[in-house]
């Protein structure tokens, strides 16, 4: 059952025709360093339940002591969250924004995780030859909508395919789906977390408008030699999408590798919404 804040948006979406054209992603405003930090902190609070869901899904697919390659790492909030809950893994991040890479490296240092996480400046459409030979998992969480076009999205998937062919790694990708109604893009950030700063709401709206549809993403993946890709679009409120592949050797993780952490009551509700929206996604354990 969806929370009350999302139910009205879901109803409007279900009654709207899919006519919204994609608007390539742009940051809402050029923020100063302190404003950028405040905005990223607001994003973490608003997305904590999403991070928890994605960290659990990733944890299920990555083996003990695995190496994770994350595409579009931004300020590193998801990477820190994942690393704290899986103390056995190391993470390599890639992001094209120098400012976000700098902020991410600072936040990683503040969290005491520089020995396990490193974010590198680079394009997510050109990375396969610049990473270690062995990677156990590739992730991309809430970042594929920043790719300028379907052609470059395809290039990103080609790069993922090259890495997977080399080492048989698992893949997990999660992002927004472009809504049918432009009003949904305006109202969703407030429904997601009331009281968020205006720059965050603008970025969230822009992200939704720039997102690929589930069909566009699935078709682009279908043109690449990846193997059996699992696809899912969120039930009831089709605002999210997930695409994943298990490791070629079939190895998954064990529940005891996951270290539970405290999350807010709002994040718990968001997480419960997501688990209901994605019944086919396997998680190693659920919040109690």
Image (cartoon, rainbow, N blue to C red):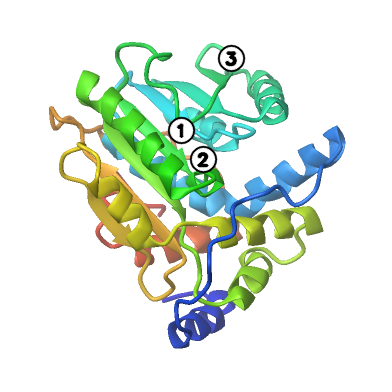
Of label 1 and label 2, which has the lower sequence position?
1
* Comparing labels 1 and 2, the label whose residue is closer to the camera: 1
In the displayed structure, does residue 249 sit left or right of residue 132? Answer: left
**Callout 1 touching callout 2 (CB < 8 Å):** yes
State the quadrant of the N terminus. bottom left
For the residues labelled 1 and 2, the Cα–Cα distance comes to: 7 Å
Image height of 281 relative to 209, above or below: above
Judge by depth and name the residue closer to the eye, 20 or 276. Answer: 20
Judge by depth and name the residue closer to the eye, 116 or 72. Answer: 72
Residue 253 in picture, x, y percent from top left: 25, 32
When asked about the image quadrant of residue 125, the answer is top left
User: Residue sitting at 62 percent across and 18 percent down?
Assistant: 112
Kindly identify which residue carries mark 3. Answer: 114
* Comparing labels 1 and 3, the label whose residue is closer to the camera: 3
Specify the label residue 85 is tagged with: 1
Of label 2 and label 3, which has the lower sequence position?
3
For the residues labelled 1 and 3, the Cα–Cα distance comes to: 15 Å
For the residues labelled 2 and 3, the Cα–Cα distance comes to: 20 Å
Specify the label residue 261 is tagged with: 2
């Amino acid at each position: 059952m969806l929370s009350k804040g999302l139910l009205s948006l879901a109803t409007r979406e279900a009654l709207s025709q899919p006519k919204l054209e994609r608007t390539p992603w742009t940051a809402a405003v050029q923020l100063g360093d302190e404003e950028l930090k405040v905005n990223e902190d607001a994003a973490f609070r608003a997305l904590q339940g999403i991070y928890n869901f994605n960290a659990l899904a990733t944890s299920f697919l990555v083996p003990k002591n695995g190496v994770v390659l994350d595409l579009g790492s931004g300020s590193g909030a998801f990477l820190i969250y994942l690393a704290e809950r899986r103390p056995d893994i190391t993470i390599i991040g890639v992001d094209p924004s120098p400012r976000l890479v700098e902020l991410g490296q600072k936040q990683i240092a503040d969290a005491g995780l520089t020995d396990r996480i490193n974010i590198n400046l680079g394009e997510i459409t050109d990375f396969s030859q610049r990473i270690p030979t062995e990677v156990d998992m590739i992730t991309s969480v809430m970042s594929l909508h920043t790719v300028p076009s379907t052609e470059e999205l395809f290039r990103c998937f080609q790069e993922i395919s090259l890495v997977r062919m080399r080492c048989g790694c698992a893949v997990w990708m999660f992002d927004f789906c472009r809504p049918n109604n432009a009003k949904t893009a305006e109202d969703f950030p407030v429904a997601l977390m009331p009281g968020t700063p205006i720059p965050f709401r603008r970025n969230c709206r822009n992200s939704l408008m720039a997102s690929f549809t589930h069909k566009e993403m699935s078709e682009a993946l279908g043109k690449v030699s990846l193997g059996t890709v699992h696809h899912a679009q969120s039930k009831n409120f089709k605002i999210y999408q997930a695409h994943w592949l298990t490791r070629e050797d079939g190895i998954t993780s064990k529940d005891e590798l996951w270290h539970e952490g405290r999350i807010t009551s709002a994040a718990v509700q968001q997480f419960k919404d997501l688990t209901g929206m994605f019944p086919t996604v396997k998680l190693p354990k659920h919040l109690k």
